[in-house]
Image (spheres, rainbow, N blue to C red):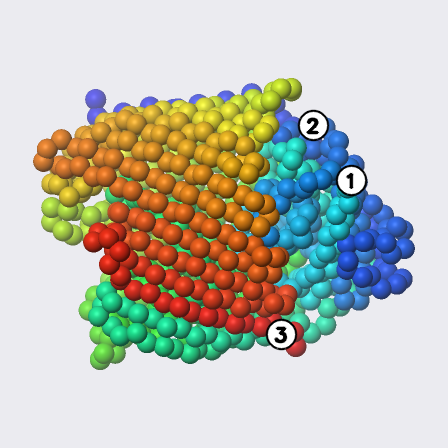
Amino acid sequence: MTQSTPVLKYNCLFFASLLLTVCASAQQIDVSKYKEQYKLAIKKIAQPIKIDGELDEADWQQAQAANDFWLKFPTDDSKAKHKTEARVLYDEKFLYIGFTVADSMPLIGQSLKRDSRIRENDGVGIMLDPFGQKTSGFYFSVTAYNVQADDVLSASNNGELSFSWDNKWYSEVKRYPDHYNVEIAIPFKSLRYDKNSKIWGINFIRSDRKANEFHTWTRIPVNFPGVDIGYLGSLVWSEAPPDPGSNISLIPYTTGSLISDKQNNKKTIGDIGAGFDAKIALTSSLNLDLTVNPDFSQVEVDRQVTNLSRFSIFFPERRNFFLENSDLFSSYGIPPIRPFYSRRIGLDPDGNTLPIIAGARVTGNVASRTRVGLMTMQTKASGDYAGQNYSALTVQQQMLKRTTIKGYFFNRQGFFNEQHKLTDPLDEFGRNAGAEIAYQNEKGEWQGWLGYHLSMKPDVSSKKSFLNAGGGYFGRSLTAYIDFDDVGTNYYTDIGFIGRIENYDAFRDTVIRLGFRQFFNQNSYRIIPKNGNIIQHRISLDNFFVLNPDGTINDRSNGIGYNIEFKNTSTFEFRFAPAQTNLKFHTSFTDGAPLPPGIYKYNQYSTRYSTDSRKTFSFRGGITIGKYYSGKYLQYTAEATFRQQPWLTIQLNAEYNKLEFPDPYGKQDLLLLAPRVEINFSTKIFWTTFLQYNTQRNNFNINSRLQWRYKPASDFFLVYTDNYYSDPFLKNKNRSLVFKLNYWLNL
């Protein structure tokens, strides 16, 4: 029997899983009629509106109300019992939204910090699709304690909110014993829209956290996110929306810092800096963003993790300039194979900052069904690194109802000279091009994707492509899909990320590139009880295996899991995961001898439990036991949270990993402690402190950040960062104290 036999067996399993979906019952929801079924007229005001949360102006009483909301979670087959009403008005400058929300006191507000998710609070939100094409839109939400959050929506981000988009708008909340009001004013200058379009896509959402429910105006299936832009109703204008006129925003900033670097024997230095960002509306739907000498010192530090794998870990981007409309660039491929990964811009491989001179980005719609993105960033030489230019071009075209065809070209170009000489020809440039098609039926249940990607490097002519394809069914009860990826050994992504193409050989102390083919299949079945204290049971089966270029198996893992979710927000899950690895190179997991190449089979069992997250004190924890390669493995995780809502949150995260291999391969105890304290003095002043003690990285980090939003979209930051060795304990590496002041100016 050859090693290709298991591949045939698992292929049969994958396709059998997909065939099961044919028997699944379809949801009786006809989304094609939503624009007519859910229509709301927008009224122009006769008298000025004061944003005070009172909703006492006559125009509010005369405006048509969106009410009779659907229950979205925990189920989607009935109307919400607690009443919510939403109305929309406008004048020449603002779009006004008013909510009246029936509720009892006290209300849940876990934080006063901006961009808090309303799913964890009591609150309301609105989704807008000014083009009505289900390709992109805007999201605004306000909690019952007037905490704002905003984001850009797109069909390619699967309902995930990054809260990267930050704009200027206004809101107030008024709380009463049996209800609360929310009043919102959004400047038309903050939106992108076709001023000739008289029908916008719209939906309203409400989080009823005390009841652990989520409500939406239009009916959205429970298996899709509440912010899915495929299920919007219609906002109907009797006349064309106002012309926003010129729309230019300038955001200058100044910074000051004191930096001490004992690790590299450098003296304490002070520095003063300045720069600016600008937002310029080229058209009503296309925006130009500029940045000169950008500074990201106010960005929160990465949350450290313990890495027990053989490969690098994907950390999310946190810098707002790269996050806004990031789906245009970063949605190609699949995680963790991404042709575009913005963290490669302005950071070296160790995460140290490289100075960015300037950058520009054009994003938006050039037609109602066509989105474009163009970006260029220039870094200057620093230390051993030559200056680099990073450029990206992408186009997305919507076809049919919810199908997207998109293509891209990415380029990194190095600028070498006598001081920074080119030593490796591959460093001269790196270019990537590709195209993808993503299909969804109108309800979003059936999906498929296909993409072809090519890399270009000096003197590289073969094995330089990446192919990905997949599809599946995403139903109310049953989900089953398969994904296939073929990555060539010479497929490079200088502005991207590939988790496993580089293999470190500990015996020869070298990195070896090795292409691979991988298959991933996931199946889950959800049972939603009609009554009782249980929201849902979920049973899952997933299969993953990786092939070497010669067709032999490199990695194989399977997982069988069971999850139960209760109405009081507590959860319990269990998972059994057998795995096999054909280790190709010597690999070190401890200070002992590296594990030799060979075939390793090992099983792991894990369980997780979390308590009611709405309580003052909540806890989640888990344990994993079993084998890891030829050794014994044990992991404990714990997260304890204390909240004095909405002012104070104290959270302690802890993770302990124990690896014990037979002699001479060593033992390893790894500890990660990560307390976090967040104090919200108001909806404008926040103080957050992280402590991270990580024995794997031999680092103890302190990061403390004070933010004062003294005017809408204008902030003052004061950030203190300190790093120590964990062994020898508390020997200082470096520290810094930085302030940043920016101001949002509309021209």
Tag 2 or tag 3, which sits nearer the N-term? 2
Disc with the residue nearer the chain's start (3 vs 1): 1
- Residue 369 is situated, as x and y percent measured from the top left of the image, at 63, 55
Question: Nearer the observer, disc 2 or disc 1?
Answer: 1
- The answer to whether 272 is drawn above or below residue 93 in the figure is below
Q: Residue at left 63%, top 26%?
A: 26
What residue sits right under mark 1 in the picture? 178
Q: CA distance from mark 3 to mark 2?
A: 47 Å
> Mark on residue 77?
2
Q: Mark yes or no: residue 568 visible.
A: yes
Quadrant in which residue 22 is drawn:
top right
Image quarter hosting the C terminus: bottom right
On screen, residue 546 versus residue 94, left or right, reads left
Local crowd size for mark 3, using a 10 Å CA cut-off: few (<14), some (14–19), many (≥20): few
The answer to the question of whether label 2 and label 1 lie on touching residues, with beta carbons closer than 8 A, is: no
Assess disc 1: are there few (<14), some (14-19) or many (≥20) residues with their C-alpha within 10 Å of its C-alpha.
few
Displayed quadrant of residue 102: top right
Q: Which mark is residue 745?
A: 3
